[in-house]
């Protein structure tokens, strides 16, 4: 990961540097089932623009969370996959996902 030494206050801060923004976590979640091409990621993330997806994929690759593999074919084919670091990060996001499911708007109110 490319966090600047000494720039993170704590582990949460370092993690948030990698997954900040609306789409990065969702991209990681899409890749949890395996390798995906750009078009499949775009279809799996309704509302994301090509520019934002491209930017976030580059940042996630730079941070060592995903890999980008180009195939020398016509038409060109590129596949994205989680690295070991990315799988570890996705595992860490699992409890956050469960919390969100439990407490999302429209769900049963949580007893006080």
Image (cartoon, rainbow, N blue to C red):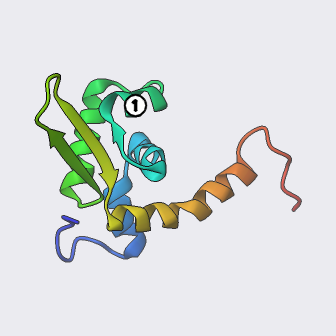
* Residue 93 higher or lower than 80, as above or below: below
The quarter of the picture where residue 63 lies is: bottom left
| 75 or 61, nearer to the observer | 75
Front-most of residues 22 and 74:
74
Residue at 80% of width from left, 43% of height from top?
107
Residue under the point 22% across and 52% down = 61
Q: Nearer the viewer, residue 104 or 54?
A: 54
Image position, residue 110 (x, y; %) = 84, 55
Q: Which residue position holds label 1?
A: 40
Q: Work out whether residue 45 can be spotted.
A: no
Q: Where does the image place residue 19, in percent across and percent down from the top left?
A: 37, 54
Q: Report the side of 93 relative to 95 (left or right).
A: left
Residue 5 % position (x, y):
17, 75
Vertical placement of residue 8 versus 34, above or below: below
Label 1 packing within 10 angstroms: few (<14), some (14-19), many (20+)? few
Left or right, 88 with reference to 37: right
Q: Position of residue 47 (x, y in %)?
A: 45, 24
Q: In which quarter of the image is residue 7?
A: bottom left
Residue visible at 33% across and 51% down?
A: 81
The quadrant of the rendering that contains the N terminus is: bottom left
Residue situated in front as seen by the camera: 37 or 57 = 37
């Amino acid at each position: 990961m490319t966090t600047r030494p000494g720039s993170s206050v704590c582990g949460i801060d370092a993690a948030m540097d990698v997954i900040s923004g609306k789409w990065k976590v969702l991209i990681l979640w899409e890749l949890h089932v395996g390798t995906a091409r750009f078009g499949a990621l775009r279809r799996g993330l309704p509302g994301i623009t090509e520019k934002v997806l491209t930017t976030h994929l580059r940042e996630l690759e730079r941070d060592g969370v995903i890999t980008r593999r180009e195939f020398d074919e016509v038409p060109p084919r590129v596949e994205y996959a989680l690295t070991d670091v990315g799988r570890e990060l996705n595992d860490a996001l699992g409890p956050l996902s469960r919390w969100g499911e439990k407490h999302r708007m429209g769900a049963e109110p949580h007893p006080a």
